[in-house]
Image (tube, helix red, strand yellow):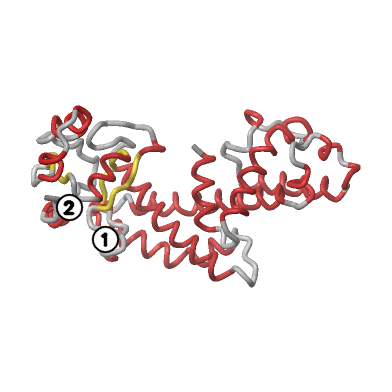
């Protein structure tokens, strides 16, 4: 789970492109066994893909830099599957990137914790927006390794990611981490679906009442207006599906579930005003 979240983050925020981002992920994959063998302290599970504190990552980064300075004299180099990752400093850079990710996660979680105390979705969104605006510049800059070349561009990319992640975290928590149609609880296939699209409705971007927790198939169908939900939160299937898709899979996924009431969230109910607008666009 951590590996996927970091991968998504680094690909979204790395201003030097996907090649460098992929190298960071690969470097962290290789570092686990190396640290298990050579690092003075035990590494949980022999992997970099678990929750490190910022302090732990700084200590690992310091050790990597010290070993790298030894060049061929370091015993680490002989054990590396791809020595260039070590000699070209991808490993130290990857650990720095992981530290950035952990810091951003901590920043997001603090905002979500405060925003979720609000009484309504709109007030939760307003609180989140206010905290992001007030704290993001100082808190994020303190932990991001910003160069003059990439500073503004990278910070802007991280801020976009922060907004999207905060919405996702609020929505998934609101639905108990389960798809509101199927009850599926596998995080990797769950989506925080906007009822009113992100690009079209700026004022509701962070509003958890504008969100549904849906597994990937239902998220895609909802996004394309093939399904929706009525005023009683029951699944509505579009004429497009009814008229053109009658195979067993379509029946199982959609037709048999029509009229089924979604699993309602713990606090921020989906906005009926936004659902009504969504239903008006049902396909077919």
Residue drawn at 52 percent across, 58 percent down: 13
Whether the residues at callouts 1 and 2 have beta carbons within 8 Å, the answer is yes
Q: Position of residue 268 (x, y in %)?
A: 23, 48
Distance between the Cα atoms at labels 1 and 2?
10 Å
Residue drawn at 13 percent across, 57 percent down: 277
72, above or below 35, in the image:
below
Tell me how many marks there are. 2
Q: Residues within 10 Å of mark 2 (few under 14, many from 20)?
A: some
Residue drawn at 39 percent across, 37 percent down: 187
Q: Position of residue 237 (x, y in %)?
A: 13, 41
Q: Position of residue 272 (x, y in %)?
A: 13, 52
Q: Residues within 10 Å of mark 1 (few under 14, many from 20)?
A: many
Residue 110 left/right relative to 200: right
Q: Is residue 119 visible?
A: no
Residue furthest right as drawn: 73
Q: Judge by depth and name the residue closer to the eye, 59 or 94.
A: 94
Residue drawn at 24 percent across, 59 percent down: 122
The residue that disc 2 covers is 271
Residue 242 quadrant: top left
195, above or below 47, in the image:
below
Q: Secondary structure at mark 2?
A: loop
The residue that disc 1 covers is 204
Name the N-terminal-most of marks 1 and 2.
Answer: 1
Q: Secondary structure at mark 1?
A: helix
Q: Is residue 15 visible?
A: yes
Q: Judge by depth and name the residue closer to the eye, 268 or 240.
A: 240
Q: Position of residue 226 (x, y in %)?
A: 18, 46
């Amino acid at each position: 789970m951590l590996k996927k979240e970091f991968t998504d983050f680094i690909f979204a925020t790395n201003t030097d492109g996907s090649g460098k981002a992929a190298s960071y992920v690969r470097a962290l994959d290789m570092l686990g066994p190396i640290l298990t063998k050579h690092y003075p302290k035990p590494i949980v599970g022999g992997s970099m893909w678990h929750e490190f504190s910022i302090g732990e990552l700084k200590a690992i980064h310091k050790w990597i830099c010290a070993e790298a300075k030894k060049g061929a004299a370091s015993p680490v180099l002989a054990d590396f599957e791809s020595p260039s990752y070590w000699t070209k400093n991808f490993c130290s850079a990857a650990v720095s990137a992981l530290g950035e990710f952990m810091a951003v996660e901590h920043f997001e979680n603090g905002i979500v914790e405060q925003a979720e105390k609000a009484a309504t979705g709109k007030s939760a969104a307003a609180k989140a927006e206010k905290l992001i605006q007030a704290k993001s510049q100082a808190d994020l800059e303190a932990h991001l390794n910003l160069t003059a070349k990439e500073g503004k561009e990278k910070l802007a990319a991280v801020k976009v990611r922060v907004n999207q992640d905060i919405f996702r975290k609020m929505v998934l928590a609101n639905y108990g981490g389960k798809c509101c149609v199927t009850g599926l609880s596998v995080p990797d296939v769950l989506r925080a679906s906007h009822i009113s699209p992100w690009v079209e409705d700026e004022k509701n971007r962070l509003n958890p009442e504008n969100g549904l927790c849906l597994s990937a198939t239902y998220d895609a169908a909802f996004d394309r207006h093939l399904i929706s939900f009525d005023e009683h939160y029951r699944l509505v299937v579009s004429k497009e599906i009814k008229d053109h898709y009658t195979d067993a899979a379509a029946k199982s996924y959609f037709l048999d579930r029509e009229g089924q009431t979604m699993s309602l969230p713990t606090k921020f109910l989906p906005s009926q005003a936004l659902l009504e607008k969504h239903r008006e666009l049902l396909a077919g």
